[in-house]
Amino acid sequence: MIAFFEKEMPQAQSELHYGNTFQLLVAVMLSAQCTDKRVNMVTPALFAAYPDAEALASASIDEIYGYIKSVSYPNSKSRHLKGMAEKLVADFGGKVPESVEQMQTLPGVGRKTANVVAAVEFNQSVMPVDTHVFRVSERIGLTTGSKSPLQTELVLEKHIPPAKIPVAHHWLILHGRYVCTARAPHCEECGIKDICRYFGTKTKMKTEK
């Protein structure tokens, strides 16, 4: 799997648009249960109005809502964005901390969001697990019977070389987004079908019929 993706996606990266670490954090928070395409539609105006933590912290929840109302769960995300910015200013001098644990003290920032920022911006060997990573890992056979994103995260971090974990996160997301889709995966187009547990099982069932 690693050999295939290194050849086919050597420069895999996030499809979110951002200019710095703070903007990435905001974009990832907005992307929860929302498409990157939708997030990228609202962030240019949001970042223009509030380019840093200090500016966002000074905005009202209603003002933030006006910029992000078209994303999923805009009410809670507006509150979380303001709270996150306020805590960044109060506790971290307006800068996003590199520590995953410290990031998770920010309102609205869970383990997956913190891991994304740590992997993408700070090149840390942590594996963010979203729905794509969770599904693809289980389907192709990187995990077996995983019950939670944390279980998937720990298994992937154990078996993928540390230096490759940050980019492997993007490999799995993009593969899940465009090839190994939730419904009707495009197996015939898949470059790793020969090592895929799902495809192997499906092929065996057809043969037995």
Image (cartoon, rainbow, N blue to C red):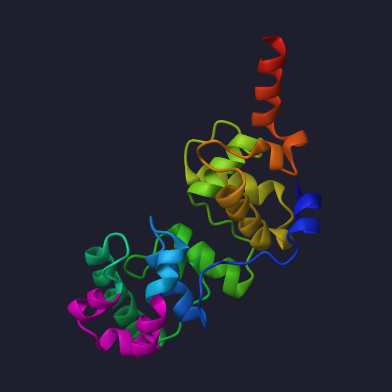
Q: Is residue 155 left or right of residue 56?
A: right
User: In the figure, 93 relative to 151: above or below?
Assistant: below
If the image is split into quadrants, where does the C terminus sit?
top right
- The magenta-colored residue range is 43-67
Is residue 191 visible from the viewing direction of this image?
A: yes
Looking at the image, which residue is at 23% across and 77% down? Answer: 66
The residue at the point 37 percent across, 85 percent down is 53
List x then y, in percent, for residue 129.
52, 52
Where residue 106 appears, as percent x and y from the top left, is 36, 70
Q: Residue at x 52, y 62 (%)?
A: 115
In this figure, what is the number of numbered marks? 0
List x then y, in percent, for residue 183. Answer: 50, 37
Task: Examine the image and state in which quarter residue 202 appears.
Answer: top right
- Observer able to see residue 104: no
Left or right position of 11 against 44? right
Give the dominant element type of the magenta stretch: helix, strand or loop.
Answer: helix
